[in-house]
Amino acid sequence: MTGPVPELEERATACARRLCAADRVLLASHIDADGLTSAAIAASALERAEIPFEAVFEKQLDGEAIAGIAAREYATVLFTDFGSGQLDVIGRHERAGEFTPIIADHHQPADEETEFHLNPLLFGINGASELSGAGASYVLARALADVAETTPGGDSELAADGGTGAETTDRHPRADNRDLAALAVVGAVGDMQASSGELHGANEAIVDDAVEAGVLETGTDLALYGKQTRPLPKLLEYATDVYVPGISNDANGALRFLDGLDLELKEDGEWRRWAELTAEEKQRLASALVQRAVSRGVPASKIDDLVGTSYVLDAEPVGSELRDASEFSTLLNATARYDRADVGLGVCLGDREDALERARTLLRTHRRNLSEGIDLVTSEGVTHEEHVQWFHAGDRIRETIVGIVAGMAVGSEGISREKPIVAFANKNEDEIKVSARANHGLVRRGLDLSAVLGEASREVGGDGGGHDVAAGATVPNGEEETFLERVDEIVGEQLGSER
Ligand code: C5P
Ligand code: C5P
Ligand code: ZN
């Protein structure tokens, strides 16, 4: 198998055997890019193992959602990209004999255990940066291929000693499920696990699998978002993670910079895109950009961030969102976060016609919503408490994307990188959605947003969780202020009072 952690794989094998013993499975997953890719990986693996299943998606796995899942009367439920944080509630249904849960997740677990629980955090792997939900699903999919191979037809006679792959007669060419690794890379990138330009830890082993399976190409490339689809001037103008004065956020500046390069900028009257440039042209543009950044005083550490590892799904056509792991993940967020998980799942499962066309339409709306959301936050600004900064979007930003907006707004004027950002948006009449984002530097200093949001939300009658670096919660309408005071206090304690 792939990874460096045998215990994780042993657990995956146990989960896979349990799945093979099921007559049918309900697959439940989360509505973001990682959740969709998790579901697509699990769905493909179940189908290949000939295990009947049905897929459902939940915005949030709260008590009500879990009760709804139980009501569908499946004896086996596979949760992907969530479930760990809700093990207390899931455990109650399990003990009541309603279903057996199998969980492939990477969120901070609730204080409870279950037998078929596959989560990197249980095995010393960082769930926020080294393995995503899709990564956990992929580890499960690999195990399922092994187990299914030794138990033909999904027979419930389980192999006594894990599938070692000894008898490889009439193996399907994709029978090891390694081709699914590309989707796991999209999930990890979508969950922002490629910090400092590349994927790390267990994710790296998945990248290797994907490359070996011929479904992914990696390389050192410009680390800007939109290399496949953005016209060159927009690629530069919108790239603000590394702020290059005179280019970033400066449409005319970006154009003047490109004009000075002696590059063919248009083809048949249309702006060219990065992915269409020749290697030599890419080199020329990248060097000029770095030179410009240096001459404008951008610090060396930031300049390094202009270059990173690219993850290219090379079976997809040049210029398609699906070719770039990061753009693919945005396309997926544009579906499931708008109640169209079916569309995103269709794209992940290979539909390049109706589903892809529909997804592209949804993407336009998503882009507009993100851009309007960021404008709102940057124009109205955030309120600074001692240890955190926050804004309340009310009904003006959709609760399913307010976390993305918060993360993207960080670094804009007045929005500090030194403090976590907490965002509120209305969920319904009675409840408020909270999203919080930080960075790995703050996590190294002791910050754990999952603990902060969990504790503070429960104190006001809500619930929350997630990862150290990014977390979410639901709180009762009207409790925002009390909640925020507690958040500020706990963050202060975690970071130590002197700053
Ligand atoms: O539910 P899930 O684990 O899939 O979501 C993780 C969330 O955390 C994503 O919205 C992702 O963008 C965010 N994140 C972040 N910064 C990181 C790591 C994750 O904003 N460094
Ligand atoms: O919803 P948002 O994008 O802010 O979520 C950030 C992270 O927190 C995600 O990984 C999400 O799954 C998690 N989360 C959670 N419990 C909640 C809300 C969000 O574990 N109630
Ligand atoms: Zn995830």
Image: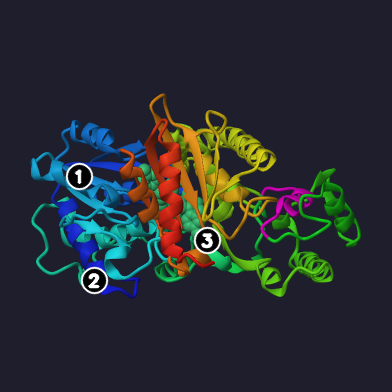
Q: Position of residue 74 (x, y in %)?
A: 17, 37
| Neighbour tally class for label 3: few under 14, some 14-19, many 20 plus, Cα within 10 Å | some
Q: Nearer the viewer, mark 3 or mark 2?
A: 3
Visible residue check, residue 475: yes
Query: Disc 3 and disc 1: Cα gap in Å?
Result: 31 Å
Residue drawn at point x = 62 percent, y = 35 percent = 364
**Number of numbered discs visible in the structure rendering:** 3
Residue drawn at point x = 60 percent, y = 32 percent = 365
Identify the residue position indicated by label 2 in the image: 7
**What are the residue bounds of the magenta stretch?**
229-241
Disc 3, SS: loop
Q: Nearer the viewer, mark 3 or mark 1?
A: 3
Amino acid type, mark 2: Glu
Identify the residue position indicated by label 3 in the image: 439
Quadrant location, the N terminus: bottom left
Quadrant location, the C terminus: bottom right
State the image quarter where residue 276 is shown: bottom right
State the image quarter where residue 274 is shown: bottom right
User: Mark 3 or mark 2, which has the lower sequence index?
Assistant: 2
Of 316 and 231, nearer the camera is: 231
User: Mark 3 or mark 1, which has the lower sequence index?
Assistant: 1
